[in-house]
């Protein structure tokens, strides 16, 4: 099998057998060029993109939803048209309503006003169900269970890289509004009760910086995207 092909400004590193998200964090901390995608295609799709932000962390964490929109665009291009893809605010990826993967984010700092030395976004997408009886986990699914039997992890990785790079260029040129519009249109659970970061309420949507608006009683809480940063 040929190695994955990436668009200009992005490059790839096969870390099969390792967790790409953990490997990317280690690689970024040691120093590397931005735009490196570490990946493992042995079964499911696991990948992580290393970024070098030029804006404070509070704005740079937009890379999580940006990469999520890239996932949706990639699946929209490759999966059958009747397969709906939505995103949870906390990074979960849903296909036909079931959890099918997730996005993760980490950075060199947790200080919102600091410009991170590096930022990593990881993505996982499940191709095969982990159990034969999917009734045991009704909220979980896999791409092959949702009519995507012709889809290969490598094809999805390449498509995600292209769509994410396009989204990154648009974000750099046009700012947050286009990303806000695209992500808000894909968010799962708006108008429904939800628990996030220890608070429970009704998910109203997202503010201009993509933070969660959570209404509890007469109070609307704002939960910033930075709360999703992993230690």
Image: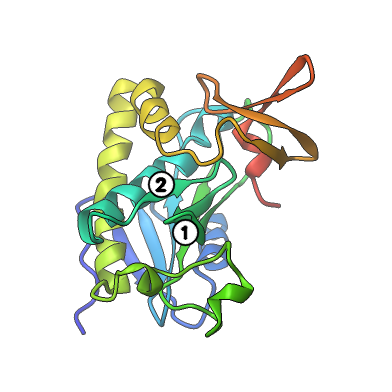
- Whole-percent x, y for residue 152 in the image: 28, 74
Q: Judge left or right: residue 104 versus residue 231.
A: left
Residue appearing at x 30%, y 38% in the figure: 167
Q: Residue 97 at x, y = what percent?
A: 48, 54
Looking at the image, the residue that sits furthest to the top is 218
In the rendered image, the quadrant that contains the N terminus is: bottom left
Q: Which picture quadrant has residue 228? A: top right
Residue highlighted by disc 2: 67
Residue at image location 57% in from the left, 56% down from the top: 29
Residue 182 is situated, as x and y percent measured from the top left of the image, at: 36, 32
Residue at mark 1? 123
Can residue 102 be seen here? The reply is: yes
**Residue ID at (40%, 24%):** 176
Report how far apart the C-alphas of labels 2 and 1 lie in the structure: 8 Å
Which of disc 1 and disc 2 is earlier in sequence?
2
Q: Residue at x 19, y 80 (%)?
A: 2
Q: For residue 143, which quarter of the picture?
A: bottom left
In the rendered image, the vertical position of residue 126 relative to residue 10, given as above or below: below
In this rendered view, identify the residue nearer to me: 40 or 29: 40
Looking at the rendered structure, the secondary structure element under dot 2 is helix
State whether residue 1 is above or below residue 218: below
- Number of residues whose C-alpha sits closer than 10 Å to that of mark 2, classed few (under 14), some (14–19) or many (20 or more): many
| Residue toward you, 8 or 62 | 62
Q: How is the image coloured?
A: rainbow
| Relative horizontal placement of residue 115, taking residue 83 as reference (left or right) | right
Using the image, tell me which numbered label, if any, was put on residue 64.
none
């Amino acid at each position: 099998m040929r190695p994955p092909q990436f668009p200009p400004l992005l490059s790839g590193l096969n870390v099969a057998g390792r967790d790409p998200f953990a490997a990317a964090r280690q690689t970024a901390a040691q120093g590397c060029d931005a735009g490196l995608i570490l990946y493992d295609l042995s079964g499911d799709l696991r990948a992580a993109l290393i970024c070098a932000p030029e804006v404070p962390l509070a704005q740079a964490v937009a890379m999580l939803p940006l990469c999520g929109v890239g996932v949706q665009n990639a699946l929209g291009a490759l999966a059958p048209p009747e397969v709906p893809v939505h995103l949870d605010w906390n990074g979960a990826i849903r296909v036909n309503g079931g959890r099918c993967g997730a996005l993760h984010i980490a950075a060199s700092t947790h200080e919102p006003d600091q410009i991170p030395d590096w930022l990593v976004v990881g993505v996982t997408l499940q191709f095969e169900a982990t159990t034969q009886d999917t009734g045991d986990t009704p909220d979980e699914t896999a791409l092959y269970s949702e009519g995507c039997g012709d889809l290969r992890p490598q094809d999805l990785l390449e498509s995600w890289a292209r769509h994410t790079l396009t989204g990154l260029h648009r974000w750099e040129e046009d700012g947050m509004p286009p990303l806000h519009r695209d992500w808000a249109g894909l968010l799962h659970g708006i108008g429904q009760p939800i628990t996030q970061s220890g608070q429970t309420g009704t998910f109203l949507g997202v503010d201009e910086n993509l933070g969660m608006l959570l209404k509890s009683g007469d109070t609307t809480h704002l939960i910033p995207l930075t709360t999703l940063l992993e230690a």
